[in-house]
Amino acid sequence: MKIFKFGGASVNSAEAVRNAGSIIRREWQQELVVVFSAMGKTTNMLEEVVNAAWHKTGNTDLCISKVQQYHAQIINDLFPAHHIVHHLLEGFLLNLSVVAGNPSFGYDEFYDRVVSFGELISTAILSLWLDEQGLSNILLPAPSLLKTDNHFRGAAILWPQTCERIQTHVRTVLADNPGHFILTQGFIGSTTDGRPTTLGREGSDFTAAVLAYCLDAQEVIVWKDVDGLLNADPVYFDTTQLIPALSYRETIELAYYGAKILHPKTIKPLRNKNIPLRIRSFFHPELPGSVIHASEQSDTLIPFFILKKEQLLLSFSTRDFSFINEEKLKILFGVFSDQNIRINLMQNSAISFTVCINHPQHKLSTLLEVLGEDFEIRYNEGLELLTIRHFESVDLQTYVTGCRILLEQRSRRTLQIAYQRTCQ
């Protein structure tokens, strides 16, 4: 048993879909489960639908029409004019319009209900097309397999229920349909009472790991637009190095700090069952890529660079000069948890506490209102957060000369700097 995961970039056009089909045809040699994300930047488009409907920032119908036009272009290139897939797309978009027109849930639950359409649409298209290419598959909806709590936008897996469902459904379907593989959605699940949930952005990696854990898979292969694991994102850094192998331990550290290697939760279930994960290129599938496994002998001291943009630096100070003690921190962390806000960097002094977070555009006013009664709050927008793992040999001035550094923190192996880019 192997688990394949294809991200949005690997199916962002008709040509990319054909390439994914070629990879499956070439690599499918045993029991197989294939996890697909939404196509291209569909999740971003659906977030525009969420904001238009919830915050009244735009025309909801116009945002949905962008989703329709994007998928219709791919469908028109893959299928004949009167194929049933056109009606399937219309049905999904009609349901999306109904959901978007009724934003009566909490924001996070509404977000999950809308954004989950991306994976549902992509897998419906892909399942039909692959089947017609002789790549026989059975589409199993991820919400019927992955059961979660109701922590919307970052739901936690309910492991006993999820593994029972995966083992029962996947094993039964494969046994009853020889010569078929399983196709399912990444990123999405559902509560025990059937409400849609998501696992956090880039959560399709985690879906693949959950399936691998529950099925005792031989390995997971994540197909990406790079040749393997790189020490920096080539979008932001001119010079990168390919890392042939890395341990679970080092990988989870990098993912925690925001490296776009994998979703941060991906590693734990794989490590618990010693299942290796390979990162391979969908542009060059003949290359071996990189492997993430248990051995730490392959770990390197080559610096890893992680850049997060659009950061918000928030500083909280007590109004009466009382200490930032455990009780004060409990209040702050409680609000961050309630608002589903992840802290990327934090630092405290006697009477102040500072955090660097992804800018929560729609939640900043709530933070200021809820915490403003107890704390004086200052904030800086539009920052960047640079994290360097194994920074000892790095000339820092190469990256931050002329920038206004607002917060810096060092540990034995990791350096983090939050700064304003007044430099270019």
Image: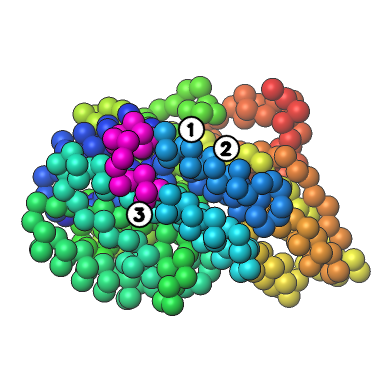
Any mark on residue 233, and which? 1
Circle 3: residue type: Gln
Disc 1 residue crowd, few under 14, some 14–19, many 20+, Cα 10 Å: many
Location of the N terminus (image quadrant)? bottom left
Q: Which residue is mark 3?
A: 185
- Which circle marks residue 161 in the picture? none
Q: Residues within 10 Å of mark 2 (few under 14, many from 20)?
A: many
213 or 369, which is in the foreground?
369
The answer to which of marks 1 and 2 sits earlier in the sequence is 1
Q: Secondary structure at mark 3?
A: strand
- Magenta region: 74-89
> What residue is shown at x 8% (from left), y 56% (from top)?
178
Is the magenta region chiefly helix, strand or loop?
Answer: helix
**Residue 174: x %, y % from top left:** 14, 60
Residue name at image x 54 percent, y 29 percent? 236
Left-right relation of 55 to 282: right
| Circle 3 crowding by C-alpha within 10 Å: few under 14, some 14–19, many from 20 | many
Of pointers 1 and 3, the one earlier in the residue sequence: 3
Q: Mark yes or no: residue 151 visible.
A: yes
User: Does the residue at mark 1 contact the one at mark 2 (Cβ under 8 Å)?
Assistant: yes
Q: Amino acid at mark 1?
A: Asp
